[in-house]
Image: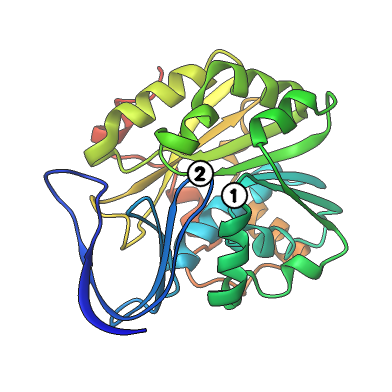
Amino acid sequence: MATDVWVNETLYAEWGQRFLVTRELARVRSAFQDIMIFESASHGRVMLLDGVVQITERDEFVYQEMLTHVPLLAHGAAHRVLIIGAGDGGVLRRVLQHRNVSRAVMVEIDGEVIRLAREFMPAISGDAWHDPRATLIVGDGIDYVKQAADDSFDCIIVDSTDPIGVGEVLFTDEFYANCARVLSAGGLIVNQCGVPFMQADELRETSARRGKFFAHVGAYVAAVPTYVGGFMTLGFAAKQAGLAEVDTATIRARAQAAGVLGTTEYWTPELHISAFQLPPYIRRHLPG
């Protein structure tokens, strides 16, 4: 359906952004949330969940690369990866770029997000759905980690909405305790912690919760244009200290061995290291 209207994002009551819609592609009320996909004049195809921008074709690479390559290369030997959320398939695609990954389990609660992304934004996931190393589960990530065996995964990547509505349960003590249990001895978890210029409480509270179960808790940043308000923070929690302090040469060598060096549009070994160098207005919300 062709249109000439504007869509206003509803994340903040006092501030926001809007997109000129050239064509509405889908508008669905799932069992969990309102889903809208439209063609924009500026950012290609855009997905909104409950009125909040989740992904755009134009800048998805920033968020997806940083959410994926940073933890996998910081770990250095992650063979088993659990992805929670990420129904568009972009994280799964980038996880499977890593040659050393032997198993990637993706648990997305809303099957409609997967269906609509596959139909209207197929380039984001590419051929990831058909990779034999991938297992897709339409289900509750909370229940999955609760039932998973100890030492099941080396890395957990949580790509969720903010801690409201369907995403709220992914920010609890119980969830992080189970994540720590199912991770291997050198395991780590990353998850989005919002834009701290506008959502400082999200970073502060999430970091405090993770600190109860992980030896190292920190964050790194990515500049995603459509996540308005400055840097997006990605929470980083590891069962061993030191994984966020690897040098550039080591990260470069790991990326080369994994097969991802030279394939990215945002991530580089140098940027990997510098992303952990936080400005004071962000660092003050982390423990220690």
Residue at 21% over, 65% down: 18
Image height check: is 174 above or below 245? above
**Residue 158 picture location, percent across and down:** 58, 42
Q: CA distance from mark 2 to mark 1?
A: 7 Å
Tag on residue 4?
none
Residue appearing at x 46%, y 66% in the figure: 60
Residue at point 23%, 39% (across, down): 198
Q: Position of residue 268 (x, y in %)?
A: 53, 63
Mark 2 = which residue?
Answer: 32
Q: Secondary structure at mark 2?
A: loop
Q: Quadrant of residue 213?
A: top right
Task: Report the residue marked by disc 1.
Answer: 110
Q: Is residue 31 visible?
A: yes
Query: Which quadrant of the figure has residue 113?
Result: bottom right
Above or below 22: residue 28: above
Rendering coords of residue 204 (x, y %):
36, 24
Q: Is residue 183 left or right of residue 38?
A: right
